[in-house]
Amino acid sequence: MKHCIISFILTCFLYSQEFNIARIQYGGGGDWYSDPSSLPNLLDYLKTHTPMKKAGAEIKIKLTDNNAKHYPYLYMTGHGNIKFSENEIIALRSILTSGGFLHADDNYGMDKSFRREIKRVFPNKDFVELPHGHPIFSSYFTFENGLPKIHEHDNKPPQAFGIFEDETLIILYTYETDLGDGWEDESVHNNPWEVRQESLKMGVNIIYFALTQ
């Protein structure tokens, strides 16, 4: 029944438009372009394993682009430094407080700069760790133990952090999991299909939750 209700909502939402993921191009020297096959593979999995048949494409944007506000689902990743301009800070704050959603996936090395820049976006908000029982872990597929561990970095457990506007999750930050590595082509990291599938399923959950919360 849950999937039927969610499918109906998403069918209505996507009836007249494709669902695209907008990858944020940022400054500071970090590789915003990393894991190039990840989002196309995630969108293909979404299209072939869920009722969201209008899953579209990865769109690369800068936050100051005139059309940036047209994409309700933003994504960013990388290994290095992130630096937003003052105009990008204003733009991101406006997008996220006007119905937008950002998923940031640490590809190992962006944690310090990402937290610093989000503090500039929302000085009065703090990241909150999402418990295993949060609805994002059961929005389509069920993850009883919370965020799956996809790629090993510092032998730390995977954690999902959120920034909220009232009760709405507007930023999801996935840390020490590296979902994007699991979304990439198999030949890139040689992850077994079971690991890649867990990552793709979690990606589906994030999208479903963002569109139906």
Image (cartoon, rainbow, N blue to C red):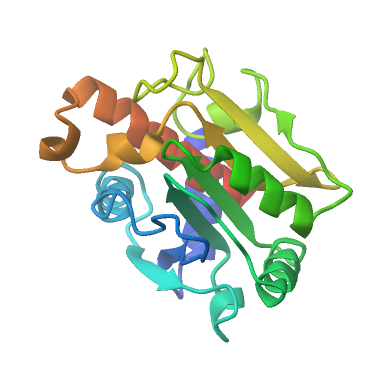
Q: Looking at the picture, how far across and down is residue 114, in whole percent?
A: 61, 47
Residue 160 is left or right of residue 23, and the answer is right
Q: Residue furthest left?
A: 187
Can residue 34 be spotted in the picture?
yes
In this rendering, the count of numbered labels is 0
At a point 39% along the width and 70% down the height, the residue shown is 59
Between 110 and 178, the residue placed more toward the observer is: 110
Relative to 147, residue 21 above or below: below
Q: Looking at the picture, how far across and down is residue 54, in whole percent?
A: 35, 63
At a point 61% along the width and 40% down the height, the residue shown is 112
* Occupied quadrant, residue 188: top left
At a point 14% along the width and 36% down the height, the residue shown is 186
Residue 72 is left or right of residue 193, and the answer is right
Q: Residue furthest bottom?
A: 66
Q: Looking at the picture, how far across and down is residue 99, in whole percent?
A: 70, 63
At a point 43% along the width and 35% down the height, the residue shown is 108
Can residue 213 be spotted in the picture?
no
Q: Looking at the picture, how far across and down is residue 152, in whole percent?
A: 36, 20
Residue 146 is left or right of residue 195, and the answer is right
Relative to 182, residue 31 above or below: below
Q: Residue furthest right?
A: 124
